[in-house]
Amino acid sequence: MKLIYYPGCTLKNHARNFDVSTVSSMAKLDVEVEELDRWNCCGTVHALGATNVMNRIAPVTNLVRVKQQQANEVMTTCAMCYNTLKRANIDVQKRAAALETINKFMYLDEVDYQGDVAVHHLLEYLRDRIGFDKLSARVKKPLKGLRVACYYGCLLVRPKEVAFDDVENPTVMEDLVTALGGTPVPFAQKTECCGAYHAVDNAEIVADRTNKIMSGATEQQADVAMVSCPLCAFNLDFKQPDARRLNPELQPMPVLYFTQLMALAFGCGEDDLRFDLHHIDPKPALAGRGLI
């Protein structure tokens, strides 16, 4: 089985651990992820102004690339990329005039987009197309005893039109952890914002959010936090020292992508995990549970 895969910019840079663990773990499920040819940046965030057609061009261009690759669906793992591609797609499907303007703008070297590409997040694909029962059958190293705080953040569940799970209490991550043999912990902060790009202009906001989110995970005695967004991963992992300045009692906790836990449970090698790209090394927490 082949699946067209849109990695996005960060997965080819600071979040290479997200990219390689995606490819290797899906191979264990007999799914060949075929990287989208000539993909470009999705634009990172969806422009809220209905008249802002220019900001739809970057995500729609990627959907055109999917059609050029003789496919009708595309998968991404980054929550931010998913949200941007999905919302732009919904927007142009609803607004024929905006889609016409975009197609006219791209007339030199693109085919017209008809709004006929389906955008999926990998968590959605695992649940609905693979099935957690089949996924569980491929586990070679169950995450037995590993307590996981599943952090969704904003963009997997907001706005409601792009959500593929309950917007108030999503469970797809917890179901994945259970299928991998781990223990998802109750986590009240799982859909709270991490502070996003305030890491650039107001670091104190991110320090405060990181403190509250990771403190919530600690209160539930989680060993690790699990995410699906490189920006969330950065804020919750690399910004923990800033959070400890606000709360000296905050204990370090590793933050992993859900695909890394999949790769670990499927028996993939260290090169597919890339723990060297983390600020807080996951190895001690995993070794404490006998997983490495």
Image (cartoon, rainbow, N blue to C red):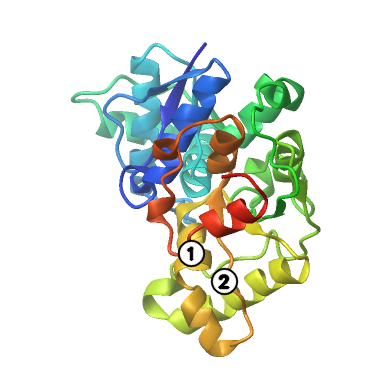
- The quadrant holding residue 131 is top right
Q: Which element type, helix, strand or loop, lies under badge 2?
A: loop
Q: Residue at x 33, y 32 (%)?
A: 61
Q: Is residue 49 above or below residue 162?
A: below
Of label 1 and label 2, which has the lower sequence position? 2
Residue 142 in the image: x percent, y percent?
Answer: 70, 36
Q: Which element type, helix, strand or loop, lies under badge 1?
A: loop
Name the foreground residue: 114 vs 251.
251
Name the foreground residue: 142 vs 292.
292
Residue type at mark 1: give it: Ile
Looking at the image, residue 35 sits to the left or right of residue 83; the answer is left
Q: Residue at x 62, y 42 (%)?
A: 162
Name the foreground residue: 147 vs 91.
147
- The quadrant holding residue 120 is top right
Q: Is residue 32 above or below residue 245?
A: above
Q: Which residue in the structure is indicated by mark 1?
A: 280
Q: CA distance from mark 1 to mark 2?
A: 7 Å
Residue 108 in the image: x percent, y percent?
Answer: 18, 25
Crowd band around label 2 with a 10 angstrom C-alpha radius: few (<14), some (14–19), many (20+): some
Q: Is residue 179 above or below residue 258?
A: above
Q: Is residue 94 visible?
A: no
Q: Residue at x 34, y 40 (%)?
A: 57
